[in-house]
Amino acid sequence: MITQHQLPHIEAVIGRLVRFDRPADAVLSGYFRENPKLGSNDRHEIAETAFACLRHYGRVSALVAPKRTPRRLMLATLACARDINPEVLDRLLQDNERQWLDGVRAAPQPDTLSVESELPDWVIERLADPSPDAVRALGAGLMQPAPLDLRVNTLKMKRDAALAALRDSGLAAEPTPYSPIGIRLAGKPALNKHPLFLDGAIEVQDEGSQLLGILVGARRGEMVVDFCAGAGGKTLLLGAMMASSGRLYAFDISEKRLSNLKPRLARSGLSNVTPQLITNENDTRIKRLAGKIDRVLVDAPCSGLGTLRRNPDLKYRQSAKSVAELNDIQASILASAARLVKAGGRLVYATCSLLPQENRAIVDAFLAAHPEFELLPANQLLAEQKIALDTGDCLELQPHLHNTDGFFAAVLVRKA
């Protein structure tokens, strides 16, 4: 229930968010730290309204134009995006706002494809299928809340046992439709104190991300590199696939991201992971491993547009220019990572982007410049794992079709 006390906080948060100069979750976390007396219901309503504003920003900003003040954005979001009961909302308004908001409610909805799909024009122009029906379907899918997916740590527990334990603790849990090691929960229950989480038997990981790790195909005793490890979700999956044997390197240029891996690594029970801080993709630590690695995963830096269900601000913080700059980085990282792969070894290039410019175009250019590599059909590899998912010779997951984040992956092999 929205209260008068919450409105100035919502207005302040929206004012910060629509600068689009920092990640939305960081803005929200910072605001809550500055205001520690806010209760859990207050924080919930503030976050819900702020993210509703970001998800529907195209529509609400058009409705309040030309005067896009944070307060007007907030009121239009509450009335038109969150559908707060008009009688409840009207009691919270200043006298001069009631007539204005009645006009907003009665105004015809903007009918441009960009506003209808809540996707900027520059994104629509770069989609593989920019037809109106396809764009509307994608936009509607990106507006839905993302499910809470878990990965079972197979070193510690089988999926059936984890499902039973989660259900016994009162959680509604089902197997994920594609990943054989995934579980999908209903709602957004807190898990950080759940015994299975504390023991490292489960980790939060989108089903699409799990499928990327499965395509790497890491095996016992191999040498494997997670080239852009980040906080290590896929690293932990690869380590479990290797049954904690062999050697698994987790490279990243961010000390903070690698430090976030440490507590997860401790819970996981893995002993084969070597986190490595590197300066760039040409670091000497990488060069020492040239031609020695069985499997390399490149989860490349990207626009993140496949994660808009969770991070709706990205469509306004990214731009055509920033994506073009990322393309140079992606090509450079892929070429550098390829040097690690030994004859017969596997290289997986992946992003959480929906744009062909960051996906197939990077792979096609790499293959043209590196005839020693060839593409392995992803659908064939998934079929071998008895995973009934066929998106063609590359993995291309879309939120509105697969209920995962938007992911791309191409599997490459260095010819023997």
Image (cartoon, rainbow, N blue to C red):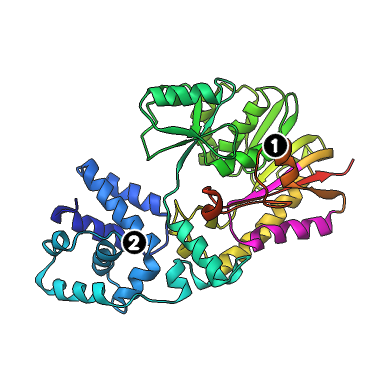
The answer for how far apart the CA atoms under marks 1 and 2 are is 40 Å
Of residues 164 and 194, the one drawn nearer to the viewer in this rendering: 164
- Which x, y percent locates residue 10? 25, 57
Q: Residue at x 71, y 52 (%)?
A: 392
Q: Extreme right residue here? A: 416
Q: Quadrant of residue 68?
A: bottom left
Q: N-terminal of the two: label 1 or label 2? A: 2
Q: Mark 1 against mark 2, which lies toward the viewer?
A: 2
Q: Residue 133 versus residue 245: which sits nearer the camera? A: 133
- Which contiguous range is marked in magenta? 347-370
Q: Label 2: state its secondary structure.
A: helix
Choose top left, top right, bottom left or bottom right for residue 370. Answer: bottom right
Most distant residue in the bottom direction: 66
Q: Position of residue 356 (x, y in %)?
A: 65, 62
Tell me which amino acid carries mark 2.
Cys
Give coordinates of residue 53: x percent, y percent.
34, 61
- Residue carrying label 1: 225
At mark 1, the secondary structure is strand
Q: Is residue 125 magenta?
A: no
Residue 393 visible: yes
Mark linked to residue 53 = 2
**Above or below: residue 179 compared with residue 81:** above
> Residue 175: image x %, image y %?
52, 34
